[in-house]
Amino acid sequence: MSAGPAADIPAAPAPVPYEDGGLAPLLDEALARVRAPDVVVAVSRGGHRTVVSGGTAAAPAVPREDLGFGLGSLSKTFTVLLLADLARAGAVGLDDPLAAHLPGLPPLSGDACRITLRHLATHTSGLPRVPRDLFAGAVLHPYTNGYAGYSGDRLLSAYAHVRPRHAPGTRWHYSNFGLALLGSALAHTAGTAFPDLLTRRVLCPLALTATTAGADAARSRPDRAIATGHHGDGRTPFPFTDMAAFTPAGGVLSTPHDMLGYAEAHLRSAGGPLAGALRDVQVPQLRKGFGRRRETHTLTWFQHPASGGPVLFHAGATFGIQCFLGFHPATRTAVAVCATRHDRTSSVVHAAYTLLQSLAGRPLPGPAHR
């Protein structure tokens, strides 16, 4: 599951004045940059949506923009929004120890005891990217789904025996392990399964009716409505990815339109469902990296400077699908890009990020242009 590292992000283009009718060429340019069997580029500007699609394969039976795409690490933003909502409700505290929400564990090492829910959300827990017993399947063999069948009990056992790489809160280190544990802790506290909890507290209030979490929910969709991922060659299909206990870290499926709806909820200045939690997840928490690779991290989003104010974004990938979602509050702009191929040459992150920065440099058209 990709985190959208800064190394993949191009330099921001120079701002250009808005020209009426100038949106379509930018979307077409982004679409042409992405090489995959199925590609969707979707933009929301002030609540007005424009979607283009294409790809190297024949058009599927279902319009590409209606397909459910595996979001990979973009799923983490949903889990952290759930955390923020539960914190607003007083069910958890951001600085609660993780262990306090996972009772029954054996004695933990000193640093493991000090991991908080905030540390998990911001990737500062000190936990490795994946548990030791998952490393071979999830990292060394990128087209082998080692996550399938990884149970919640196995996840908790891995936590009980882990030795963090560094003291919590001292360094940023991306961790699927940490977000999986965060989802497990929230589910345990609420006394319900994570997919059901996310649906009830986040997906339903935001009217994300085409977004689901977990393998069972995904399998309830018609097969033809789920995007089929592909290996790096762009031809070999890859089966649906069951993330099991790692669903909070990478097991959400969504359509491009629902992705825009999710971003639009973040762009509302006030009011609406989860308004407080949506603001909370956009508050900067830390800065990491140096020089061109220096960036700000909110509770869940990467934040980069842009014209008129920062852009916030996150990328994600399953074993055969890559997605990007970003938004620019100053111009009420959101960009979602999905592709059924995951490798560096597919250019999803580069194309999507460039489009987002380009639109951030263009003020919204006035009422006469709408």
Image (tube, rainbow, N blue to C red):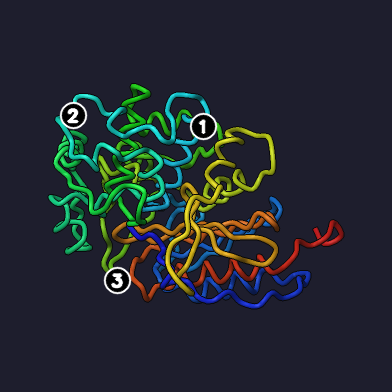
Q: Amino acid at mark 1?
A: Cys
The quarter in which the N terminus is drawn is bottom left
The residue carrying mark 2 is: 105
Q: Position of residue 290 (x, y in %)?
A: 44, 70
The residue carrying mark 1 is: 204
- Which of the two labelled residues, at mark 3 and mark 1, occupies the earlier sequence position? 1
Position above or below: 327 against 18: above
> In this rendering, would 151 be left or right of 168?
left
Res 162 → quadrant? top left
The structure residue drawn at horizontal position 63% and vertical position 71%, both measured from the top left corner, is 358
Q: Residues within 10 Å of mark 1 (few under 14, many from 20)?
A: few
The structure residue drawn at horizontal position 34% and vertical position 66%, both measured from the top left corner, is 342
The quarter in which the C terminus is drawn is bottom right
Outermost residue on the right side: it is 368
The structure residue drawn at horizontal position 75% and vertical position 61%, both measured from the top left corner, is 364
The structure residue drawn at horizontal position 30% and vertical position 45%, both measured from the top left corner, is 178
Position above or below: 133 against 110: below
Please say whether residue 218 is visible from this viewpoint.
yes
Q: Nearer the viewer, residue 244 or 53?
A: 244
Q: Looking at the rendered structure, which numbered label has been put on residue 232?
A: 3
- Which of the two labelled residues, at mark 2 and mark 3, occupies the earlier sequence position? 2
Q: Position of residue 86 (x, y in %)?
A: 47, 29
Q: Residues within 10 Å of mark 3 (few under 14, many from 20)?
A: many
Q: Position of residue 28 (x, y in %)?
A: 59, 72
How far apart, in angstroms, are the residues tagged by discs 2 and 3? 41 Å
Q: Nearer the viewer, residue 182 or 224?
A: 182
User: Which of label 2 and label 1 is nearer to you?
Assistant: 2
How far apart, in angstroms, are the residues tagged by discs 3 and 1? 35 Å
What kind of element bears circle 1?
loop
Circles 2, 3 touching at the beta carbon (< 8 Å): no
